[in-house]
Image (spheres, helix red, strand yellow):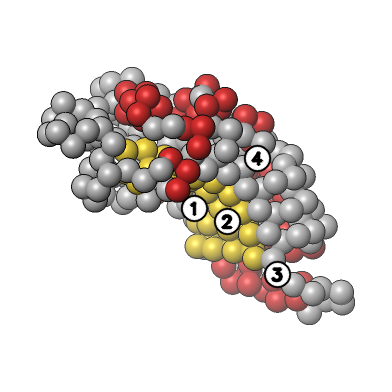
């Protein structure tokens, strides 16, 4: 992974090594297409929008295949906090080879998982139709409508509580080649209100014919989930 943050390419960082240096490893950046690129800032540091702009100026994004979006700020910070999804959509033409996206690689020290704020991520799938892997951490304010993708193979949602409408949207999506699905269902205290009934499209296999890994995790109704999975496994014709 190559890290691009508030220390990358700035006057403070520029000690003669140039802006093409990873601030974490101290090594020169690899070719753009050979790394997963982490782009993020830190609390009370340079605004994420500025880091993002400098990243696009410094790195040949036309070769980037994997992108990891780290901390971009929170609504309680004084500066205007940009929506990383809108920044990504606005720059979609500059990332023709993007295949993997992790939205919200934010540690507990930066923000608890239940505090990570999102908006509508649905447009990402239209802006980047060749995405094969999408991971999202955090679910506060998260919006998702049913999507359609013939390329997506891995979809993961990490959360303290995943809204039932997000679970139902995934279940209603047209994802014929999805092989790996993780849903951290969480608890009601953090918005996790999905029921076993909402999981029916995943357990039946009808909506996701290529699915080979199903993670229904971190749920306060885990016993009910386990019982539903066990019942489905014992039914005739179940082969997963």
Q: Earlier in the sequence, mark 1 or mark 3?
A: 1
Q: Earlier in the sequence, mark 2 or mark 3?
A: 2
Q: Earlier in the sequence, mark 2 or mark 4?
A: 4
Please, what secondary structure does the residue beneath circle 2 have?
strand
Q: Earlier in the sequence, mark 3 or mark 4?
A: 4
Q: Which residue is mark 1?
A: 158
Residue 205: x percent and y percent? 79, 61
Res 20 quadrant in image? top left
Residue 100: x percent and y percent? 54, 46
Residue 206: x percent and y percent? 82, 57
| Residue drawn at x 16%, y 26% as measured from the top left | 11
Marks 1 and 3, how far apart at CA: 21 Å
- Tell me, for residue 130, which label it has, or none: 4
| Residue drawn at x 79%, y 59% as measured from the top left | 209
| Residue drawn at x 87%, y 77% as measured from the top left | 236
Neighbor class of circle 1 (other Cα within 10 Å; few <14, some 14-19, many 20+) is many
């Amino acid at each position: 992974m190559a890290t691009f943050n508030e220390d990358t390419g700035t006057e403070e960082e520029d000690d003669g090594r140039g802006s093409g240096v990873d601030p974490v490893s101290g090594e020169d950046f690899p070719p753009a297409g050979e790394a997963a690129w982490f782009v993020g800032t830190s609390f009370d540091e340079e605004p994420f929008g500025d880091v993002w702009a400098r990243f696009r100026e410094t790195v040949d994004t036309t070769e980037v295949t994997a992108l990891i979006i780290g901390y971009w700020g929170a609504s309680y910070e004084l500066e205007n906090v940009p929506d990383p999804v809108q920044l990504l959509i606005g720059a979609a033409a500059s990332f023709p080879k993007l295949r993997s996206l992790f939205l919200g690689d934010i540690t507990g020290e930066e923000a608890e998982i239940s505090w990570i704020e999102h908006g509508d991520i649905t447009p990402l799938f239209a802006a980047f139709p060749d995405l094969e892997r999408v991971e999202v951490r955090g679910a506060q304010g998260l919006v998702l409508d049913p999507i359609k993708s013939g390329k997506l193979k891995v979809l993961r949602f990490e959360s303290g509580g995943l809204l039932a409408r997000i679970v139902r949207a995934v279940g209603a999506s047209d994802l014929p080649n999805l092989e790996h699905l993780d849903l951290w269902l969480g608890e009601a205290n953090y918005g996790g209100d999905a029921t076993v009934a909402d999981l029916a499209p995943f357990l039946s296999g009808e909506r996701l014919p290529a699915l080979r890994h199903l993670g229904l995790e971190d749920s306060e109704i885990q016993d009910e989930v386990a019982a539903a999975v066990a019942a489905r496994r014992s039914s005739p014709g179940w082969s997963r």
